[in-house]
Amino acid sequence: MNTNLSALDRRKFLRGTGVALALPWFESFSGVARAAQQPVKLKRLACFYMPDGVPMPLVKDPGYKDWSWFPHGQGKEFTFTKCMETLEPLRNDLTIFSGLSHPAVRRVHGHSNADQFLTGADTGADGDYQNSVSLDQVFAAEAGKHTRLSSMVMSTDGGTGSPRGAQTMSYNASGRPIPAEHKPKRIFDMLFVKSGPDAARRLALSKS
């Protein structure tokens, strides 16, 4: 049997011997101890919606070479245009997708679908609708266990807006819009001001 000693738990080892012994530190346990001392690297998710779109000139357009939003080329062999050239130092850490679309949302005006941007729900082109949970809130439900704030929803206008004229792109598990914040002072306070007995602990988490 191939046993990985570095993965052994000291308590399990002692139980396996059938006796309680005062043993010296095992070198094989040092890897477990080091892992326990290292802080957890938290993953972040940022979602951006630009209702006015991005430059998408045709291939025959003079601006296509420099101002097409998406890089030219495929796979790892691509070239940034002026739109994204500042990301060049990070090119090995990026995956850029194009051609994505929510089939159920194509009937909605392209500049008015913040409602469906992260949900993909079939809301129809007019009238009331039932939305679904947005992708960012699915992520926040897990990430929020380790951070001071589970998510921050922001927009230029704030609030929720109206169907197909939403000012938020975040929706809870019931499909209800989450009001977006747009006042810099409130956003600053949410991030840095201690406002309760548990705030200091959660603020420390947000700095980890």
Image (cartoon, grey):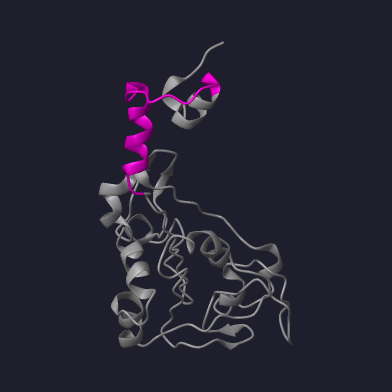
Q: For this rendering, which residue is in front, 54 or 142?
A: 142
Relative to 175, is 145 above or below?
above
Quarter of the view holding residue 171: bottom right
Horizontal side, residue 113 vs residue 78: left or right: right
Relative to 140, is 3 above or below?
above
Q: For this rendering, which residue is in front, 18 or 31?
A: 18
Q: For this rendering, which residue is in front, 128 or 68?
A: 128
Relative to 124, is 1 above or below?
above
Residue 181 in view in this figure: yes
Residue 92 in view in this figure: no
Q: Residue at x 56, y 67 (%)?
A: 137
Q: Which residues are magenta?
A: 16-39
**Picture coordinates of residue 201, whole percent (x, y):** 35, 68
**Picture coordinates of residue 107, whole percent (x, y):** 69, 74
Q: Quadrant of the N terminus?
A: top right
Q: Residue at x 69, y 69 (%)?
A: 121
Relative to 149, is 178 above or below?
below
Quarter of the view holding residue 195: bottom left
| Residue 180 within the magenta-colored segment of the rendering | no
Q: Quadrant of the C terminus?
A: bottom left
Horizontal side, residue 168 vs residue 192: left or right: right
